Image: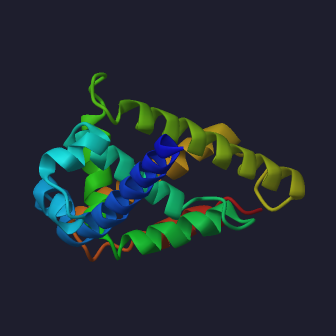
């Protein structure tokens, strides 16, 4: 039973670290958020914090996974509306957008700890959007002449590209181009 209690405390501490890290990164960005700052905020040493994650890259990958859990696509019956909601929210947390963009580039290295996260994420999102588009085609709410798989890939590329433009120019509206693209999918 003692192991169970210690295990539960470890899970709770890991969740606390992720929540604090989400807030710190959202406020200070990828480069401005240090392991020391996150560790201090949760009452741990840097070594103590890294005990839960192994490395800064593993911590930041876990932060992105937590963000996906919090901002999940699929919370409503309209996945496209969900994506617009998430992208609008991303404008309020540029540090997390910066983290996502930075790690997605670094994950191109097969040895990077975030590699599997991004590969799985893109595959999952492509499947979710392709299914939603195909379902919409069957229901008559999405044009029949589009390829659902290719369009799903385009939606992800458009959202990620708009985030990059937003990072370079915070005046870029990330939601309007997506909304216009979605309107073009309707019959």
Does the rendering let one see residue 23? yes
Instruction: Return the residue nearer the eye: 46 or 59.
Output: 46
- Looking at the image, residue 35 lies above or below residue 153: below
Q: Between residue 105 and residue 68, name the one nearer to us.
A: 68
Q: Position of residue 131 (x, y in %)?
A: 73, 45
Residue sitting at the far top: 110
Can residue 160 be seen?
A: no
29 sits left or right of 20 in the view: left
Image coords of residue 26 (percent x, y): 28, 68
- Measuring from the top left, give residue 115's x and y in whole percent: 36, 31
* Quadrant, the C terminus: bottom right
Left or right side of 180 for 177: left
| Placement of the N terminus among the 4 image quadrants | top right
Residue under the point 42% across and 31% down: 116
Indicate whether 90 appears above or below 5: below
Q: Residue furthest right?
A: 139
Residue that appears at 37% across and 47% down:
62
Front residue (pair 114, 1): 1
Residue 175 x %, y % = 47, 71
Q: Residue at x 78, y 46 (%)?
A: 134
């Amino acid at each position: 039973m003692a192991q169970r209690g210690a295990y539960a405390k470890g899970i709770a501490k890991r969740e606390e670290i992720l929540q604090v890290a989400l807030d710190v990164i959202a406020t200070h960005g990828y480069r401005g958020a240090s392991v020391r700052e996150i560790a201090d905020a949760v009452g741990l040493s840097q070594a103590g914090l890294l005990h839960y994650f192994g490395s800064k890259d593993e911590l930041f990958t876990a932060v992105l996974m937590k963000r996906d859990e919090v901002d999940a696509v699929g919370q409503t019956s309209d996945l496209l509306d969900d994506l617009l909601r998430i992208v609008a929210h991303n404008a309020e947390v540029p540090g997390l957008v910066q983290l996502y963009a930075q790690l997605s580039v670094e994950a191109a290295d097969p040895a990077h700890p975030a590699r599997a996260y991004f590969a799985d994420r893109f595959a999952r999102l492509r499947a979710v959007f392709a299914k939603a588009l195909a379902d919409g085609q069957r229901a008559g709410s999405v044009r029949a002449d589009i390829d659902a798989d290719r369009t799903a890939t385009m939606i992800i590329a458009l959202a990620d590209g708009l985030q990059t433009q937003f990072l370079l120019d915070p005046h870029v509206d990330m939601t309007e181009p997506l909304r216009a693209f979605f309107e073009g999918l309707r019959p």
